[in-house]
Image: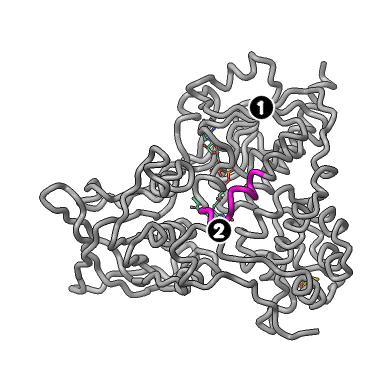
């Protein structure tokens, strides 16, 4: 057994930093088998406990090691309906790979890379026809609001139970953050389209351009004959720092910036209608995946210098380790322990500089991360012509405000019980709208909520 994990082949940084083609190239079959053979097939299966959807990790890895690829796909898909997505974007280092016994040696099994390999093998070998065979859908009718990973997973599970499932999505295209947030160079749209086509073939109906709460209400859906509703509406409301000058031109929320590029194809303007400014000196504020995606996108749009401003140190960054590594390779600059105080603009109202303050780390806060505190008198100015604010998102209050009986927590998330039911009977919720933070958490909740909906329908029928 080789002691070190096999790195994922990737495109050279200099070449990829100027285009939107996927960075990672995927394992060859020889590499996948060699990596799979590193797995010790532990009896206690600690890695499975680290997976929010409980994939039988040692079993799918064994199937790859023995070149039984259809088995590997089947085992994966049994628990995860979007493995090609998860193999690309899950923070494995905080989940399954963190629990792998080989972590002690510094080289846990590359579970995410192997998941991606198996999922891509499925597509390339056209076993999808069988996997996406239509189910015999009859009743009851369930409405899913939102087509992000929570909604898609819930829909996929319900249609397997034989339910008649309809997804309503407010945007003109489906996928939630997987489409409008995560850029093409990390998650090609064709991967997402493949998974969506599979759902459609299975009988799930999808209506886009339908904002539930405005186009029609939740009560309208019940009146139309839907017997249960799942809300997977995410948390798409951008947060701002509320510092002076934040309203200047060319200061964007990450949501708007990434949506323009990913959803509206702004990088192909004027071929597509939506423009996006091509900042030359760009500051991105934040330290998560959204900040990393914004910085790397700005670089690909032609910026000559992109600086990521983060008020803590590298160790505290919530972004996936791989994204930070890729950003560094591509030439993104990092201003750690730096806090923006405000922006100044030129005579036309366009941002021209950001004033910052240096920070130092103090005691850990409630999240366990060391809290930054200002270093007195350390102010400095950074000249910029564009800024992207990526300091987090919060739930959109529209639906609870317009729906009688839907209660929220102090943070604006929907209140749910242990069965994912909200405070409104027959309405369930999961994903970021109830406090999830990752794709796989959203999927896990979508899946568990589907079980609860099945149970709820069963009880409803018994009561009739
Ligand atoms: C830029 C970015 C990068 C990220 N990178 C990663 C990563 O690498 N790995 C990871 O695990 N996580 C990542 N995340 C987090 C992850 O994407 C989210 O946790 C996940 O998408 C949440 O899924 P969801 O289904 O709850 O919501 P979403 O993906 O937000 O989907 C919600 C959908 O509901 C629709 N909707 C909202 N309101 C209504 C309404 N009233 N009517 C109809 N439709 C509605 C929205 O348009 C949207 O399509 C990232 C997030 C962002 C923003
Ligand atoms: S913990 Fe690591 S070595 Fe053990 S079964 Fe899981 S992946 Fe294999």
**Nearer to us in this view, 166 or 48:** 166
**Nearer to us in this view, 374 or 164:** 164
Instruction: Give the labeled residue for mark 2.
Output: 186
> What is the quadrant of residue 96 in the picture?
bottom right
When the figure is inspected, residue 78 is found, relative to residue 12, above or below; the finding is above
When the figure is inspected, residue 437 is found, relative to residue 334, above or below; the finding is above
Q: Residue at x 73, y 74 (%)?
A: 109
Dot 2 or dot 1, earlier in sequence: 1
- Answer whether residue 193 is visible to the viewer in this image: yes
Q: Quadrant of the N terminus?
A: bottom right
Which x, y percent locates residue 455? 79, 33
Span colored in magenta: 183-193
- Residue 426, magenta (yes or no): no
Instruction: Give the labeled residue for mark 1.
Output: 143
Q: Ligand 1 lies in which image quarter? A: top right
- Residue 189, magenta (yes or no): yes
Q: CA distance from mark 2 to mark 1?
A: 30 Å
Which x, y percent locates residue 410? 46, 42
Q: Residue at x 64, y 18 (%)?
A: 222
Which x, y percent locates residue 308? 36, 65
Which x, y percent locates residue 409? 50, 40
In this view, the mark in front (2 or 1): 2
């Amino acid at each position: 057994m080789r002691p070190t994990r096999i790195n994922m082949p990737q495109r050279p940084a200099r070449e990829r930093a100027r285009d939107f083609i996927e960075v990672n190239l995927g394992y060859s079959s020889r590499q996948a088998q060699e990596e799979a053979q590193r797995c010790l097939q532990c009896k206690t299966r600690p890695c499975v406990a680290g997976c929010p959807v409980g994939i039988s990790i040692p079993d799918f890895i064994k199937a790859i090691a023995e070149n039984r690829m259809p088995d590997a796909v089947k085992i994966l898909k049994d628990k995860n309906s979007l493995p090609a997505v998860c193999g690309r974007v899950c923070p494995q280092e905080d989940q399954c790979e963190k629990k792998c016994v080989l972590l002690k040696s510094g080289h846990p099994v590359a579970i995410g890379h192997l998941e991606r390999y198996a999922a891509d093998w499925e597509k390339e070998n056209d076993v999808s026809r069988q996997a996406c065979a239509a189910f015999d859908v009859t009743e009851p009718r369930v409405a899913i609001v939102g087509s992000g990973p929570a909604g898609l997973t819930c829909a996929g599970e319900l249609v397997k139970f034989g339910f008649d499932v309809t997804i309503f999505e407010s945007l003109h295209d489906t996928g939630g953050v997987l489409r409008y947030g995560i850029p093409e160079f990390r998650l090609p749209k064709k991967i997402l389209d493949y998974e969506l086509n599979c759902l459609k073939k299975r009988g799930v109906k999808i209506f886009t351009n339908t904002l539930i709460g405005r186009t029609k209400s939740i009560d309208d859906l019940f009146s139309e004959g839907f017997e249960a509703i799942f809300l997977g509406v995410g948390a798409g409301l951008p947060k701002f720092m509320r510092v002076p000058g934040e309203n200047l031109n060319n200061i964007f929320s990450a949501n708007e910036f990434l949506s323009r590029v990913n959803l509206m194809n702004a990088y192909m303007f004027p071929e597509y209608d939506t423009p996006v400014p091509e900042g030359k000196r760009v500051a991105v504020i934040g330290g998560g995946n959204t900040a990393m995606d914004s910085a790397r996108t700005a670089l690909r749009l032609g910026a000559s210098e992109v600086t990521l401003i983060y008020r803590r140190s590298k160790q505290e960054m919530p972004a996936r380790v791989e994204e930070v590594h890729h950003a560094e390779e591509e030439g993104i600059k990092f201003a750690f322990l730096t806090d923006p105080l405000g922006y100044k603009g030129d005579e036309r109202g366009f941002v021209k500089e950001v004033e910052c303050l240096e920070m130092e780390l103090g005691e850990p806060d409630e999240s366990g991360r060391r809290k930054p505190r200002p270093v007195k008198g350390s102010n400095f100015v950074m000249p910029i012509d564009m800024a992207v604010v990526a300091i987090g998102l919060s739930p959109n209050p529209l639906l609870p405000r317009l729906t009688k009986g839907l209660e929220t927590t102090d943070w604006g998330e929907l209140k749910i019980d242990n069965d994912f039911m909200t405070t409104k009977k027959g309405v369930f919720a999961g994903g970021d709208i109830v406090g999830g933070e990752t794709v796989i958490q959203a999927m896990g909740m979508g899946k568990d909520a589907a079980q609860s909906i099945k149970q709820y329908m069963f009880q409803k029928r018994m009561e009739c």
